[in-house]
Amino acid sequence: MSTPGFSVVTNDRRPHAHPLLGVALIVAMGASFALLDNSVRWLGASMPVLLMLTWRYATQAVVMAAWLGWRDHRALRPAHPRFQMLRGALLLATSVFSFWGVQYMPVPEFTAIQMLTPVLVTLLAAWLLKERVRPARWVLVGLAFAGALVVIRPGSGLFGWAVVFPLGCAVTYASFQVLTSRLSSLEDPLTTHFWTGLVGTAILLPVLLASGVDVGAALAAATPLQWVVLVGLGLFGTGGHLLLILAFQLAPASTLMPFVYTQIASATLVGWWIFGHLPDAWGWLGMAIIALSGATSVWLNLRDAAPARQPPSAVAADTIAD
């Protein structure tokens, strides 16, 4: 067992190392998720959020089913279905917080608070897994929460009750990480990616049909641009995680994971481009503190895992919740 939020696998999936290409894929992953979140925020003004959420997971299930069916249909069958169902449900809960949260908060600030996940994993591992946490890690936990308070500024009325969404997103995804850190090495990451989409779709589709949302009318009323954005958000969510998996085949986690935090910059840039929003000075400061704390926590995790000389799983090392 490696440190919180990361697990090891027994084989190295990097027959050819290309660190720079791996970093480029990680940066592209962050851009994909930034585009996803901003697309959801923009499209949410005219389309039911539940429909967009179902579409996102159905796209992943269909794309991965086609890929694995062509590559090796046996990979569609999980070795541990209970793990896949629980993992899928936890990630779905995270997406629920995310899809509704960006309707009430700017994406850059939401993304920064969501990036508390690595330090929350430290807390959960100490509590649930009884893992010993060194003082340096507790300092990082405190620093990250201080950064979140700078972004949120309780009592300022800036975001109000909406901060429940990114905080809930971080908590559910940290729980997902603790589970994955224990079990992810038991499955092929592409099989897990398919089942994540399948479980999400299986849960969401009956809810959507029972919700009273007129799916046909909503889709018929969509403009060509809205259709492009809807298709895009499904592909951004599916493709972002695939980029992560591919990146881990090209470079070690110690090289890649600090670049995960470029998603905050991508979210800010895309949010400015679409909505004309930029964080204020305090927001920038809080986001920088969270990014520094999270990146340092990731580095400590990877440094402690180094003696095993085994790479963390691409699934377990994923700190992105979309």
Image: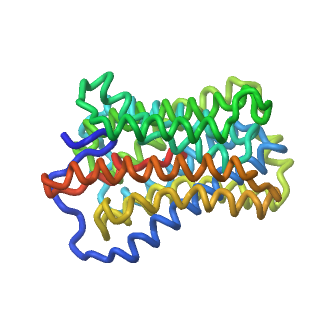
Rendering coords of residue 101 (x, y %)? 68, 36
Q: Is residue 190 visible to the viewer in this orientation of the structure?
A: yes
Left or right of 106, for residue 244: left
Q: Nearer the viewer, residue 198 or 283?
A: 283
- Of the 4 image quadrants, the one containing the N terminus is top left
Left or right of 37, for residue 46: right
Rendering coords of residue 176 (x, y %)? 41, 34
- Residue 308, compared with residue 119, is above or below; it is below
Residue positioned 56% across, 41% down in the render: 114
Q: How is the image coloured?
A: rainbow
Left or right of 298, for residue 133: left
Q: Nearer the viewer, residue 92 or 317?
A: 317
- Residue 51, compared with residue 266, is above or below; it is above
| Quarter of the image where one finds residue 124 | top left
- Residue 175, compared with residue 109, is above or below; it is above
Q: Nearer the viewer, residue 319 or 205?
A: 319
Q: Nearer the viewer, residue 178 or 240?
A: 178
Q: Is residue 235 visible to the viewer in this orientation of the structure?
A: no
Residue positioned 61% across, 61% down in the render: 265
Rendering coords of residue 97 (x, y %)? 61, 33
Rendering coords of residue 194 (x, y %)? 41, 48
Residue positioned 53% across, 30% down in the render: 203
Residue positioned 29% across, 58% down in the render: 72
Left or right of 49, for residue 194: left
